[in-house]
Amino acid sequence: MQHIQGTQRYQLQMSSLEGKIAIENPVRFIDAFVEHISLESVGFIVQTVKSEGRPSFDSKVFLKIYLYGYLNGLRSSRKLEKECVRNIELQWLLEDIRPNYHSISDFRKDNPSGLKKLFKLFVSFLKNADLIAGETIAIDGTKSRAHNSKKANFNQKKIDKHLAYIEERTQEYLTELETNDVKDNCITVTKIQEKIERLKKNKIRYELLEEQLKASGEPQVSTTDHDARALLVQGQVVEVSYNIQAAVDDKYNLVVATHTINRNDRNALSTISIEAKENLGLESFTILVDKGYHNGREIAACQNENITTIVAQPAQGKSNENGTTPAYLVSNFVYNKETDTYTCPANQTLKTTGTWHKKTREKDSYEFKKYRTSACKECPVKDLCTSRKGGREIDRSQYAEAVEKNNKLYHESKALYRKRQEINEHIFGTIKRQWGYNHTNLTGLEKVNGEHSLIMLVYNIKRTMNILGIPDLIDKIKKWNTKYPIKGYAFIKMTFFKGISAFKIIRQLLISSKTDSLTSEYCAN
């Protein structure tokens, strides 16, 4: 039996690029989407047509390249350059244009703001296409390794350790130098002197780092990517990384808001929640969040924006033999809002003087009131309640009401809360495990934000393709009435010129009125 025969390499064929791309090929949607939008209106830096010199590439070419690349697990500009030559899908998409890697790389580097706004624009399309319900949204974060090693990240403790080591080694070399001077060993003396000089240079380097750390006011400093921070990834594992925040709608698990930060989740809830609200144009919705986000100030900020919070309540501190037993944990004390008092399990009333105290943490502070009772001194169960000599004392934060409302809702909505992982863990698993986007090669928070917005945009595109199918999606994008956000400076400029026009009209009316008055007076005389 013969093997299947291929086509002869020298056989001439009459064909076009169009005939080689199937109707349901994703590149057809990329082309339709990019051609439908105005990059300048979105906020991209657009190459203008030149009257002289070599013609430039259309900026849409680079956006098509990156959307195709990230959809197919390619984000290296050099790899994308090669694909433009050998990949028939990219040849069709770019009409056989083949830009070099440097031009490809510059587009991503120069347009982080445009990529963030493009993500938001596509979210508005998803809302318009009824693919987003906007009722229940799950919020979570994941770490993305930065382009900065652990060795190039320093805190005060690490700097002190290096300086102490340098001091110790210097003393050892000086002692050794004295010994060899006596023995008159010139070769060894020269080598030791070189080592001491090297230690001096290293000491200067660490002292400069120490000054930089103090000047920044930050607890740590990174030397390769100055915005990257050492963050806790899992358990006790620490990586120099960024924290990707994502808000995901529960209808089709589509991302409705995203941004990247260089700190942990504790102070991140309100920003991502309000961003989701603005992107979708909603009045209210419910958010499902894990206990890492449990922060009174952030919960109160969300509730003030009419966002219903269901944030998991962290476990209370453990009881101990010399302190509070389970029956006397603060959760068993009943707060009376009308009298502003607490009633303890022994039916005693804890009162406050009304004085607000301030507690400051790292990048966080809040005010609280203290509640005490003199009955503690003679209470028969004091040993079960507290080991404090002055008796039990309860602190009530300024955000306590918001936290209590959230905790109550959390315990009443356990079934709804259990859906949280189903909604948002899927996207992180896909992006990091399946696609391999668990790190970034860009440096600087702004650029990293742009890349992560592009990744989330591509995730939404791929998921939407699976939901609707390519032809239906292309049809919807062509019928979509794109509404671009008004740029801040354009709005001010427009308002300013409207103001000037109004002033000119009023001025002209006043002049006309005055002229008419003078004419009438002259005619009367």
Image (cartoon, rainbow, N blue to C red):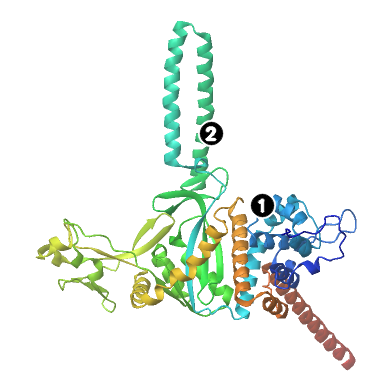
Q: Mark 1 points at which residue?
A: 76
Q: Is residue 372 visible?
A: no
Q: Can residue 163 be seen in this view?
A: yes
Q: How many numbered markers are drawn?
A: 2
**Badge 2: how crowded within 10 Å, few (<14), some, or many (20+)?**
few
**Which amino acid, by three-letter code, is at mark 1?**
Ser
Q: Is 431 rendered above or below residue 345?
A: above
Q: Position of residue 167 (x, y in %)?
A: 43, 27
**Which amino acid, by three-letter code, is at mark 2?**
Arg
Residue at image position (74%, 52%) is: 82
Residue at image position (71%, 50%) is: 78
Residue 491 quadrant:
bottom right
Residue at image position (48%, 62%) is: 141
Check residue 87 in the rendering and tell me which mark sits there, or answer none. Answer: none
Q: Name the residue under label 2.
A: 205
Q: Where is residue 437 in the image (x, y as percent from the top left)?
A: 57, 56
What secondary structure is found at the residue carrying circle 2? Answer: helix
Q: Residues under labels 1 and 2: Cα distance?
A: 33 Å
Q: Which of 212 and 186 is in front in this view?
A: 186
Residue 16 quadrant:
bottom right
In the rendered image, the residue lying farthest to the front is 1
Residue 47 quadrant:
bottom right
Q: Nearer the viewer, residue 357 or 67?
A: 67
Q: Nearer the viewer, residue 236 or 466?
A: 466
**Badge 1: how crowded within 10 Å, few (<14), some, or many (20+)?**
some
Closer to the chain start, of discs 1 and 2, is 1
Q: Position of residue 333 (x, y in %)?
A: 23, 71
In the rendered image, the residue lying farthest to the bottom is 524
Q: In this view, does 258 lie to the left or right of 177?
A: right
